[in-house]
Amino acid sequence: MHAIIETGGKQFCVEPGDVLRIPKLAGDVGSDIEFSRVLAVFPDDSPVLAGAEAGSARVRATITAAGRGEKIIVFKFKRKKQYKRTKGHRQDYTEVKVGEIVA
């Protein structure tokens, strides 16, 4: 069984046991969270649940880590004008392990 969830403005396809890096969530490492925004559920033996049918589904997960991603360098440059700008960015993330999908 797998499901499609939405969190942080992004969609993720998850199965029990998956480890995901998602945009930062509030919560401590080791705490349980529940994703209520489930877009579709794909059971192994029955038809797909989507839309209003998937509205009651939940995905339970545990926060395993939190941190910041790799640094990305943004470099702006205009030739012959002596214009150069360098900027770095590191995105915060939360790592979660999917426990179960409750449909």
Image: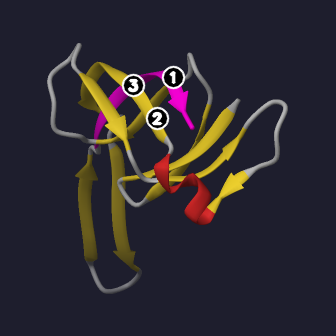
Residue drawn 58% across and 21% down? 16
The CA distance from mark 3 to mark 1 is 7 Å
Q: Report if the CB atoms under discs 2 and 1 are less than 8 Å apart.
A: yes
Taking 42 as reference, is 66 left or right? Answer: left
Earlier-in-chain disc, 3 versus 1: 3
The CA distance from mark 2 to mark 1 is 6 Å
User: Residue 11 at what x, y percent from top left?
Assistant: 53, 53
**Toward which corner of the image does residue 96 lie, by quadrant?**
top left
Q: Which residue is mark 3?
A: 61
Q: Report if the CB atoms under discs 3 and 1 are less than 8 Å apart.
A: no
Q: Which residue is mark 1?
A: 100
Residue drawn 27% across and 70% down? 84
- The quadrant of the image that shows the C terminus is top right
Q: Is residue 99 magenta?
A: yes
Element type where label 2 sits in the image: strand
Q: Report if the CB atoms under discs 2 and 3 are less than 8 Å apart.
A: yes
User: Residue 15 at what x, y percent from top left?
Assistant: 62, 27
Tell me the magenta residue range. 92-103
Q: Is residue 6 magenta?
A: no
Along the viewing direction, whichever of 37 and 81 lies nearer the viewer = 37
Q: Which residue is mark 2?
A: 59
Residue drawn 24% across and 67% down? 85
User: Residue 66 at what x, y percent from top left?
Assistant: 25, 25
The CA distance from mark 2 to mark 3 is 7 Å
- The quadrant of the image that shows the N terminus is top right
